[in-house]
Structure formats: structure tokens, C-alpha cells
Amino acid sequence: MTCGALAVLAATSPALAQAATSRAVAFAIDSQGLETALTRFASAADVQVVFSPELVRGKQANRVAGLMPPAEALRQMLAGSGLVATQVGERTFSISQGASQVADAATLEEVIVTAQKRSQRLQDVPLAVSVIDGADAARRGVDSITGLVDETPGVSINYAFGGTNYGLISIRGIGGADDYKPNGNPSVALHIDGVYQTSNAYLGMPLFDLDRIEILKGPQGTLYGRNTTAGVINVITKGPGDTAQGAGRFEIGSYDYVAVESAVGGPLNDKVGVRLAVLAEQGGGFMTGAGAGKLAGFRPIIGGVTQTQVPPIVDPGRREGFGDKNLVAGRATVALVVAPETRLTLKLFGSRDHGDTRQYDRISNALDTSIANAGENDDPYEFYSSEYPTQRIDIYGASAILTHRLADNLNLTVIGNSQGTTRSVQGNGDGSPYPASRFDADETLNQQSLEVRLGDETGGRVDWIAGAFYVADDIDFDTHWTSYTARTKYDNLHKQSRNSFALFGQVDYDLTDRLTLSGGLRYTRDEATFSGRNDDLNPWGISTFTTTFATTNPFIWDRTFEDDNVSGRVTAKYIFTPNLNAFVSAGTGYRGGGFDGTSIFTQAETLPFDSETVVAYETGVRWASPRLRLSLDAFFYRFKELQATTRLANDTNGRANVGEAESKGLEFALNAVVFETANQSLDFDLAAAFLDTEILSFSSARVADVLSTVGDPLPGAPDVTATAALNHALTFANGWRLNSRLSVSHHGEESNRLNATPANTAEAYTLVNARLDLQTAANWTVYAYGRNLTDAVYFPELNGAARLVGAPATYGVGLRYSF
């Protein structure tokens, strides 16, 4: 294996911090080959040591004996080797060249990730991974999964069908056509502290008190398995730490935004560590509700007769600052040393979001003369509506991670979870007081999962990991619709249960000192049941429900689905020098089939759609030096039985297998130290993704739809996305420090659906952000920021005559204290 993760724990979470690296340990390690000595050191100290094997092979370790902290033991062991050990995690050390081995002392920080479920240096991972650490996420304002969109090239979000509570995350153009309802199978697999999130409903989980976010791009058919045809987002939260530490902040910003966050943690004794974190956010809504406008009091007119039995459109009055947050979240982490070889980490978490639903605006009368239109001006920040929709989203749960050392080179990890969410959300995609339809959705989700894996990651010639995974989820979602098109109100009452089981394994074999071959397989078995009914309530006596939707009333169904799949990946990685390596890989991915969760009206729509498969090829180059880190990736994916939300035979939007598609492109990332002196430094970051996606075949009874769709790009696939940032730090003689960041992000043109028209294609936009932090020697920090400094008017989503506008220029200041 080209990057050794010497550890007694497999894929150890940062929360497992109870083996305090400052505590003295008894060592008795003789002088020997450094690679072997580091293995024995990691076992004796109960820590992880991450290194590139070609860096240590052929070197001799010094003898280490006596009672001392692990850091001191490593220093003695490496003395004279030209290598140094740096603590990069609460229980992780990284081995690198010493400053004397390089021409300039300016260096980039080592980045350690667990993308392959074990600790590795970022440049040694043979797949495309983007990383944002917790401090950087806070500086960039990333407080939710959707906040990654303009901070990570190749990542986008699509709200086209379900509105702003049902966003679809895409990576490299895959995922933008997913099922927006909570029973869908997201192409992007979200993991929080190692736990797979079964539904896109969990995208609403706030991100706070973070260690880091890892974005794995491309199909992950081995270690992560089901529903990873686009990639994986790993969120890792902070653990207790081996010393008392904490932080608190208070922030105010534009549009009456207020945020309070606090976290504190540390060891209670040698056996127990605890961390508590809380977050509260209020305000920030930048839209203005103008009421119902000219449509106030309107009733539908049929055959020249006003339908007086239909309630008139209500004018709710004007409201400033719509879109306010009302969020409270908390997390408790307890880390236990159960035995010398056994550790258990427990996490309890919950969040409550009872704020406003982000609202669409509508184009002006001059561009749209429909009776449904109430876009009475060109102001994109002012909308017309007969109500101001709100949301009630509660997420709660618990997880546990148990790690146990069975032997020096055999580690057991068990991850269990139980969680759920209840959601009451409202939506109206027309941006009008008189929409074609509006909905009130009540959803209850529960999931339980268990993952068990064994691994040998001691950095030897052969490393391996094998495991089993099981997840079950139950979804009960009831949607009450008001349809002015069908002149009625009706209920969709749906229930779904799923079970998924998988076996997986991966082996990394050092064929030579420079060449490593990796292979992995995963077997997945999926089962699901789906039942429901649609009831036309016909409250006004003028319903056209059965004719509009070509259905019966009531309409009832009960279906089952099952499928299995074997997916996998093979990789070859070659190390040219300690600073330069390259890899090629080929693999397959699988996304389980299932059921459409939208408004189902016909028997054909109740049938399950088939599983989606992808064949993926990728190659990448990684080059790292003390001053520069560069990665370049090229990829090609070919999809069969592509799952997508599209227009069905009865003119409703639904889920189906629509044909074949491909995605290909290039990505690169650059991190550089421009200069560094004793009191100041300047770093430069640049990353970009270039996408070329195409629908190769399309299944539809409508010839026009086929002709208009084949050759189009996939939804949620902007052609170019990029970010660039300058980070400057200046240290004063009194110990104070001034940090500044200036960043620019660009998001290219993208469509939001299959057979998209110009009215469903958002134009490219560019955002400029800046931030200043002044930190005192006593760890108090005052900061100020500005986002979208040019006050660009941009639309992340166009949905016909309705449009979702991005935030205007916003500013904020805050105070933070850490210890």
C-alpha cells in the first residue's frame, strides 16, 4: 500500500481522543528498519502514524526506551533521519521531510483524510477528494450541505421539481435528475460521522462544530456501495479532544441575522471524554413579500361564470425579511475507554428548523401574461403570494462507534445508528398567489443501520478491509395538494419500507516499492415495499381530477421491489518520486431501483423503476512539495437505465428509467504558499471542474421529447465551476494576528431538468467574498465578512416563469473566543 496508516484502530474517528498523546508511555523499541519500528511504536502508543512508505524505506530507526510522551519517542526515533513527526489529529501523527531537507521553510499543512475508511495523506489517496476543514468551513460560511455548492467545484444543487425543501445534490453532473421526494435514492451518499443518511430529507441537517468535510467525487462502488454513483460527502464532527478546549461565537449580519454557537469538550478522567456543541440562528431573510397584489380576491372563472364556492385569493399583507431562519441544534459526544484495546464513542444529536421556506419570485407581466402571473414588477427580491409558507423540520438521533484491537494488525470497527426526522413543509413552485398547484407535506422518516468491518491497515505490503452493512428505513409521507389546474384539493398518502444489505472488501497490494494494485468488490441486496392512495376531496364540486390526471378516485396501490448487484473497482497507483504519484482506475457503481414518490395517478406509475448502473474510468496525478500541492483528474462515466424525474405520459412529473447518458471531464486543484516570512504569509488556492455531459438515449412515447432531449446535457451539470482564494496572515509583535481571505467562485450555465427549455436553464454567475479576522494573544477574535460583494443578481434556479434568486450582498461581524 502506497500510504501506510499505522494504527491499532481502523478508520478511527477524531472523537476517540482518550489515548492522550501527552501522556507518558513505556517504550522498548530496538534500533531496526524504520517502517517496522513505526508499526511497533503505533501499537505501543495506541496512536496512528501516517506516512508514505517510500519516504521511510531503507532508513534505520534509533532505539527508544523508557517512559515518555509519544511525541518525544517519535522525535528520538527519527533523530538524524531527515524526517520529522507532526501531530495532525488528536491521535494521529504524520511523517514528512524535515525543514532542513527543503530549500524553503514555508510549508503547506499536511491534510489527513479517511476517504477510504482509514487515515491517509490526501495526496496518497487514489481518487478525487476535496476537503474543507472545520475552521475553513466557518470562514467560508458553510453551515449546511447546500453551502458546499459555491465552495466546491463540480458540486451543484437542483430545486426544479420539489422547491427549496427538496434540493438534489449533484457531483460531476450526476444527481440533478434524482427523485426529490424523501423515499428516493440520492446519487450522492451523505455520511455524518460514518453513518449513511438514507434520504435527501437529511440534507437539512445543519453543519457545526466540524472537524472536516470530505467530498469524494465519482462512483464509490466498494467501500460505500449503494447509491454512490455520483460520489460521497463525509461530514466528520469534532470529538472531546485530549485536553480541555472549546469555543464560542456571537455573530450579527445583514437582514437581522443573528447566530450564537458554543462548544466545549475534554477528558473528565483517563476513561471518559465529553464534548457538547450548540448552535442557534435567527433572521437573515432577504426577500420581501408583497401580498397577493392584483390577484387579491380572485376566484376561478369557468365558462364565464365566477366560481363563488371557491375561496377567494387572500391577501396576507406585506412582509419584509421573508426567508428568516429559526434554527436550534445540539450535539453531545461521549468517548469511553472501555478497555485498553476497546473504545466506544456515542453521539446524540438533534436540530429544529422552524423558519420560513425560501420563496420563488416570478418574472414580470411584460414577459408573462398568464392569469397565474403576479409578477407585477422586475424586482427579483420581491414576490407575490397568498401566503407566506413556513417549515417545521426536526432531525434527531444517536450513533455509536466501537473500535477494538483484536491483534497488532487486526482491528474491528462497529458503527450503529438510529435516527429520524419529522417534516411539515409548504411549497409553491409558481411564485404566484394563484399557482397551478401548491402543497402541504407531512413526512416522518426513521432509519436504523449497522456496519461491521475488519481491517489491517498497518502499512505493510498488503493492507485490507472487509465488512458487512445493513440499513432499514421507513417513510410515511402525506401531501395535501391544492390544484387550480384540476380545480380541486386532493391527498397523496404514501408509505415505503426498505432494507438493504451489503458485503464489501478491498485489498491494497504493494507489487513493488513504487507500484500498488488495489481491488474491491461489494455485493448489495435491496428490498422495498411501497403502498399508497390518492383521494380527490373535491371541496368545490368542480373537480376535473379524474380527467386531468387520467385516473380513478380513489386510486390505490401496493407494490414490492427487490434487486441485487455486484459492483467494484480496480486501481493501479505508481509512485514516481516521494512527491509525485499517478493512478488509473476502472469500476462500476450501482443505484438501487425503487418507486416514484411524487403524485401517482396511474397503474404504470406505481411500477418500480429499475436499478441504475455506471461504468467509470478515472486517472489522476498528485504532486506535493512543501510549498505546492497539485492534483489533476480526468474521468469518464457511462450510465445505463438512467433514473430521472421527467414528464410522464399523463403530463405529470415522475420517476422513470429514461435511457443512457455519459459524463466526462477534467478537474484540478492547486494549493500554494506564495511567500512566508517570520511574521506574515500568503497562500493561494485554485480549483476548477470542467464537465461535458450528454444524454445518449431517451425513452418516451413522445417523439418530440426524444428529439429535444437526446444530445442535451444532464440536469445539474454546469459546464465550468471554479473557486480561487488568497489567504493572507500577518502577526504583530504583541502576538496579535490578522487573517484575511478574498475569494471568487464561478458557477457555469446549467439546466434543471431533462428536455429543458431556456426557461429552465440558469445563466452562469460569479460571486466575490471577503473576510477579516483579528485574533488577540488571549484567543479573542473579532471578524467581519462580506458575501457577494459585487451585489450580483443571480438565479440558482429557473423554473419556467418562476425563479429562485440568490442572496444579494450581505455583511456581518462577529466575536469569537477559543481556549
Image (cartoon, rainbow, N blue to C red):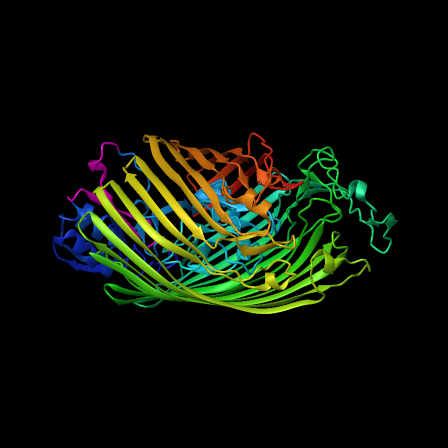
Q: Is residue 256 left or right of residue 461?
A: right
Q: Is residue 344 left or right of residue 124?
A: right
Q: Residue 370 in the image: state x and y as whole percent.
A: 75, 41
Q: Quadrant of residue 430?
A: top right
Q: How many marks?
A: 0
Task: Decide whether residue 82 is among the magenta residues.
Answer: yes
Q: Residue 371 in the image: state x and y as whole percent.
A: 77, 42
Q: Which residues are magenta?
A: 80-104
Which residue corresponds to the image point at 60% horizontal and 67% vertical from the top-left? Answer: 495
Q: Residue 295 in the image: state x and y as whole percent.
A: 80, 43
Q: Residue 485 in the image: state x and y as whole percent.
A: 74, 52
Q: Quadrant of residue 496?
A: bottom right
In the figure, 469 relative to 114: above or below?
Answer: below
Q: Quadrant of residue 337?
A: bottom left
Is residue 808 visible in the rendered structure shown here? yes
Name the residue nearer the viewer: 578 or 804: 804
Is residue 159 visible in the rendered structure shown here? no
In the figure, 137 relative to 195: above or below?
Answer: above
Q: Is residue 134 left or right of residue 421?
A: left
Name the residue nearer the viewer: 385 or 752: 752
Q: Is residue 214 left or right of residue 204?
A: left
Task: Decide whether residue 770 is among the magenta residues.
Answer: no
